[in-house]
Image (cartoon, grey):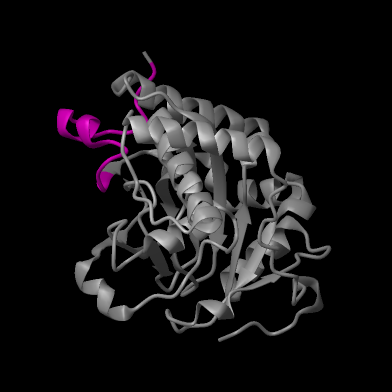
């Protein structure tokens, strides 16, 4: 049998997986696919029009300083050097859909999960390869899907907050699920007292409850990570309940709550969400327009 990617599965972690903030140890950092030459090659192979290029300010409350850019005609080696020396965040979203090596890695990760936690059924699997500069950050935000973050190179600090008031309100959550706004939203540094702070090193993986807000700050080193997103039937139910709640609030002025599991109200909201999605033309938030290009050698924010 193939050795497990995760080296410290326990009965407690299996029970808490997808419901609790959990830390694991893995061995992916030793693979050749995350060396400089391999990263340069995947940056060359990945569709350039899908590559996320971002820069940002240094103030963790200034989330509006998050700017989107373009890679231009830089080679993979030049992009990696830009990440090493600048202040940028490269996101190769759904890289498993565009590259065979990462598709195989995705299959391996979820086969490993299925081996130890076969009761958890997953789908909508998405691996993002993240390459980011020393001292870069991702502002306070949350994800609709479930997430596990795998550290491969460099170190960073991750702050994880409970998916509840005051860290995120129901209306904020609804706006994100309805795609009326981006995943980033205002953050109060006082909330750090209620956060779990994790210093993240190569060989670590962390996963957290669905919709838990979090923010990330790199140390003074190039960082390489994997962001692995997925859904379970329970997670998809929750997302649809929140979607229906947002519509009920907007159409009828209701103030609905979130029901968990197969609650009768949750099942009714699931049906409503599917109906509305099938019949309505949704208007999602427009992506940030590019405001810089790396191949023009423009200075990025310090």
- Any part of residue 233 in sight: yes
Q: Is residue 87 magenta?
A: no
Q: Nearer the viewer, residue 184 or 104?
A: 184
Task: Work out which residue is located at the far left of the displayed protein and give it.
Answer: 12
In this picture, is 5 found above or below 285? above
- x, y (%) of residue 53? 67, 64
- Any part of residue 9 in sight: no
Q: Magenta span: helix, strand or loop, mainly?
A: loop
Residue visible at 52% across and 26% down?
107
Residue bounds of the magenta highlight: 2-23
Residue visible at 42% across and 45% down?
147
* Quarter of the image where the C terminus is located: bottom right
Residue visible at 74% across and 77% down?
291
- x, y (%) of residue 148? 40, 44
- x, y (%) of residue 62? 49, 82
Residue visible at 60% across and 34% down?
275
Left or right: residue 230 compared with residue 286: left
Task: Please identify the quarter of the rendering in which residue 233 is found.
Answer: top left
Left or right: residue 85 compared with residue 234: right
Q: Nearer the viewer, residue 151 or 115?
A: 115
* Quarter of the image where the N terminus is located: top left
């Amino acid at each position: 049998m193939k050795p497990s990617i995760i080296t410290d599965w326990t009965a407690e972690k299996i029970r808490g997986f997808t419901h609790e903030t959990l830390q694991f140890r893995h061995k992916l950092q030793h693979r050749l696919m995350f060396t400089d030459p391999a990263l340069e090659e995947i940056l060359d192979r990945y569709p350039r029009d899908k590559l996320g290029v971002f820069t940002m300010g240094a103030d963790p409350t200034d989330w509006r300083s998050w700017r989107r850019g373009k890679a231009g005609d830089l080679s993979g080696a030049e992009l990696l050097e830009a990440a090493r020396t600048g202040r940028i965040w490269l996101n190769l979203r759904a890289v498993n859909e565009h590259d065979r090596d990462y598709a195989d890695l995705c299959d391996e990760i979820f086969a490993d999960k299925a081996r130890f936690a076969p009761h958890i059924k997953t789908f909508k699997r998405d691996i993002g390869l993240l390459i980011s500069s020393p001292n870069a950050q991702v502002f306070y935000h949350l994800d609709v899907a479930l997430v596990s973050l795998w550290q491969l190179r460099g170190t960073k600090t991750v702050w994880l907050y409970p998916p509840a008031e005051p860290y995120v309100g129901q209306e904020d959550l609804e706006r994100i699920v309805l795609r009326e706004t981006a995943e980033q939203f205002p953050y109060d540094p006082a909330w750090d007292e209620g956060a779990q702070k994790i210093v993240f090193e190569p060989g670590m993986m962390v996963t957290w409850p669905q919709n838990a807000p979090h923010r990330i700050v790199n140390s003074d080193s190039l960082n390489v990570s994997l962001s692995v997103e997925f859904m379970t039937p329970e997670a998809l139910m929750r997302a649809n309940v929140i979607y229906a709640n947002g519509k009920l609030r907007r159409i009828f002025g209701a103030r609905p709550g979130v029901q968990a599991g197969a609650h009768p109200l949750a099942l009714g909201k699931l049906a409503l969400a599917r109906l509305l999605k099938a019949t309505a033309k949704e208007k999602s938030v427009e992506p940030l327009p590019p405001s810089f290009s790396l191949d023009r050698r423009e200075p990025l924010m310090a």
